[in-house]
Image: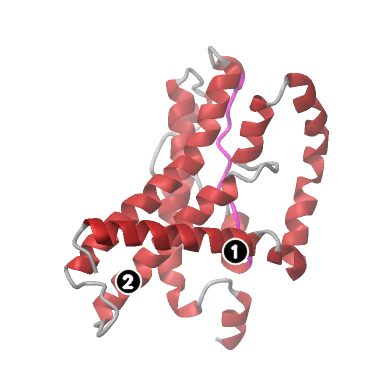
Amino acid sequence: MEFLDRLLFYPLEQLPFYLIVIIIAFTVHEFSHAYFANKFGDPTAKLLGRVTLNPAVHFDFLGIVLLLIAGFGWARPVPINRENFNKPRLMSIVVAAVGPLSNLVLGIIGALIYAVLYQLGYANPIPLTGSEQAVQIFFEAFILLNFFLCLFNLVPLPPLDGYRILEDVLPPRVSAKIQRFEQWSILFFLLIILLPVFQNYTIAPLYQAARNMAHEVLNLFIMITGGY
């Protein structure tokens, strides 16, 4: 048990809550990509059964394991053929952006629900019953992880959504030059996993930013729903 606790990025006793949150967050994220790609005229994801909220079709085993161990990971990428879009660059930006946006919306919804439960006494700090503790742990994990996934996926490095957005925002000539570095993306992620010093300047600041977002948004909703 001690070995697992040291191995995992999240507390072992809270692991079931984080797994549930990951299932929801990743599923909605990938569904959003697939749904909007199909709406914009590209049926590739739909033909592969990806326009669905069934978690099984979106999961990548290695990506989930890395999220639990290293603090970051991924689901199965949604295949997109941008040539099917009427406006390939604009629609590609939207399709890439809706993934992180979906996590932002989930985090905000989670914060609103948590604030309401707080006012009703289901998540007040002291004292908490077993069920109230479960509510608190789940919603804190739900808000934090969704905000983190939003920020993480906006990092402009391949294969993240932020990079796909950058590709289409930049002039084609510049995009062609940066595409040559895509082959090194796996090396960057391995460095993050293997060397803690890289985590201190990548994953750690993103988690801190996500915590700050969660704190500010939750406090705002608590004030709106009835004050402290």
Q: Secondary structure at mark 2?
A: helix
Check the picture and name the quadrant holding the N terminus.
Answer: bottom right
Q: Residue at x 43, y 42 (%)?
A: 102
The residue shown at (56%, 66%) is: 68
**Is 179 on the left-hand or right-hand side of 205?**
right
Residue under label 1, please give it. Answer: 71
Q: Which residue in the protein does label 2 denote?
A: 136
Check if residue 74 falls in the magenta segment: yes
Q: Is residue 21 magenta?
A: no
- Residues in magenta? 70-82
Q: Could you tell me how far apart the alpha carbons at marks 1 and 2 are, in whole angstroms?
A: 21 Å
Q: Is residue 48 left or right of residue 161?
A: left
Query: Height in image: 18 above or below 189?
Result: below
Query: Looking at the image, is 63 positioned above or below residue 95?
Result: below
Amino acid type at image mark 1: Gly
* Residue at 29% from the left image edge and 70% from the top image edge: 135
Question: Which one is nearer the viewer's eye here, 48 or 7?
Answer: 7
Q: Upstream in the sequence, badge 1 or badge 2?
A: 1
- Disc 1, SS: loop
Q: Tell me what residue is drawn at x 80 percent, y 41 percent.
A: 183
Where does residue 28 sit, x and y in percent of width and height?
A: 42, 44
Secondary structure predominantly adopted by residues drawn in magenta: loop
